[in-house]
Amino acid sequence: MKTKEDKINIVTLGCAKNIVDSQMILTQLKGNNFDAYHENNDNDSNIIIINTCGFIENAKQESIDTILKFAQEKKRGNIKKLYVTGCLSERYKDNLEKEIPEVDEYFGTNDLSKLLRNLKAKYRKDLISKRVLSKNKHYAYLKISEGCDRPCSFCAIPLMRGKHISKPIELLLEEAKNLSNKGVKELMIIAQDSTYYGIDLYKKRMLGKLLQNLSEIEAIKWIRLHYAFPTGFPMDILEVMKENKKICNYLDIPLQHGSSKILKIMRRGTSREKSEELIHRIREIIPNISIRTTLIAGHPGETERDFQEMYNFVEKMKFNRLGIFTYSHEEGTHSFSMKDDVPELLKKERADSIMKLQQKISYNLNQNFLDKKLKVIIDRKEENTFFGRTEFDSPEVDNEIIIKENTKDLKIGNFYNVIVKKALNYDLHCKLI
């Protein structure tokens, strides 16, 4: 049983979806009167819960290193209990139990109730929509579905998260209202495949309807859309975005490659030509939109010609924001049956080449903002400098607004108007109006 001295710290690795999951664990623990925290840096917790990532090799290694670090702390007697949950634990539970037996219990991605029982806590259904925020209080991620039905050859997510399951609109609205009552002004819509939302529950895509309903919550000022799968993209959401000022002119749409041959191998259900057509159409409907994409370098079968096609694709499309991963050979995926024939060094060289190109593209696009007026939300302060974002940028992964002058009255989470005075590769130096 818990004691008065017990203090729980939840350590989160991986993506924003894991942050939401950790906050849900925190909510349940606090609802059971536990002294619980998320990412507590005081090193005074005697019970540790590690929420792991198992997406690609680097993420898996980071998760393993973190488990080993806390396992050593347990050996030294600095912590009483160590639990591991999340994607890595779901995927490799048997191996982890053998290799790191210091962990008291391993749990999968759908084992929240089991984890709570182990801690002598009850799973409270009345807390499902009452998420406790653990970091920034002015923005929050809203996970609208779990899992994925897509057959992408390289992706292990369905192995760890299962099939696509949409969360009912009424529950999402209740959660969003509760978040807004806690001071949240910006919602980031996330899912493994957000554009598939609603098909399982309502027999049709319902993302547009969801966005419209969320925008009616008065305290929510910005709504940002992430992880829109390009194949079968629901064009109706563009009209909703265009007509509704609360929905940011921002779209995260992971395209993964720019070679039709590789896209076919990846089982993405599209081609470079179709991707170009979709991007052109989106920009035609919303000319001021900021499009973010993600690519993979070094998938099995990727030749120099295929890479050059992707390079030319990026050069032509001039994405506002872009990230690129090197391919990770994941067991259980379709691509694992293929030979991992691109050397790691070459994968990295290709990824670096794309990012150098994107740096130039970003710099040139940023010059268009010089002397322009922008609305920004302030995220944080470091010494005498404030950092914020425009509607064209998502936290942690995109460009930032930097304000050094006339900052004494600025408040974290508030909106301000600024003038752009200097444009760098990724960030904009601005002056407060």
Image: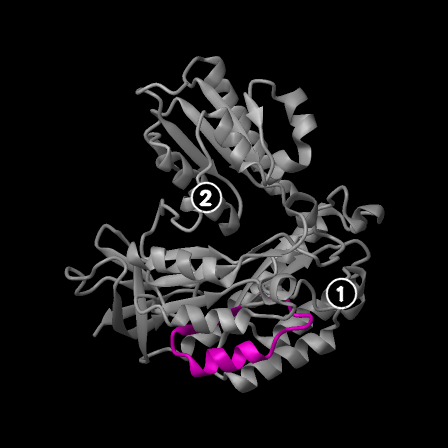
Mark nearest the camera among 1 and 2 is: 2
Q: Are marks 1 and 2 in contact (CB under 8 Å)?
A: no
Residue ID for mark 2? 125
Q: Position of residue 378 (x, y in %)?
A: 29, 61
Q: Is residue 243 magenta?
A: yes
Is the C terminus in the top left, top right, bottom left or bottom right quadrant? bottom left
Along the horizontal axis of the image, is 84 left or right of 335? Answer: left
- Which element type, helix, strand or loop, lies under badge 2? helix
Q: Amino acid at mark 2?
A: Lys
Residue at 20% x, 64% y: name it: 405
Residue at 23% x, 50% y: name it: 383
Q: Position of residue 100 (x, y in %)?
A: 61, 21
Mark number, residue 222: none
As displayed, is residue 285 above or below residue 366?
below
Along the horizontal axis of the image, is 40 left or right of 117? Answer: left
Residue 207, can we see it?
Answer: yes
Query: Distance of mark 1 from mark 2, alpha carbons?
Result: 42 Å
As displayed, is residue 344 above or below residue 413?
above
Along the horizontal axis of the image, is 8 left or right of 347? Answer: left
Q: Position of residue 18 (x, y in %)?
A: 51, 45
How many numbered marks does the figure carry?
Answer: 2
Q: Is residue 350 magenta?
A: no
Q: In the rendered view, how is the structure colored?
A: one colour
Q: Which residues are magenta?
A: 228-251
Residue 288, can we see it?
Answer: no
Residue at 56% x, 57% y: name it: 191
Q: Pick whichever, 237 or 400, lies toward us.
A: 237
Q: Amino acid at mark 1?
A: Leu
Label located before the other in sequence (1 or 2): 2
Residue at 67% x, 33% y: name it: 92
Is the N terminus in the top left, top right, bottom left or bottom right quadrant? top left
Residue ID for mark 1? 263
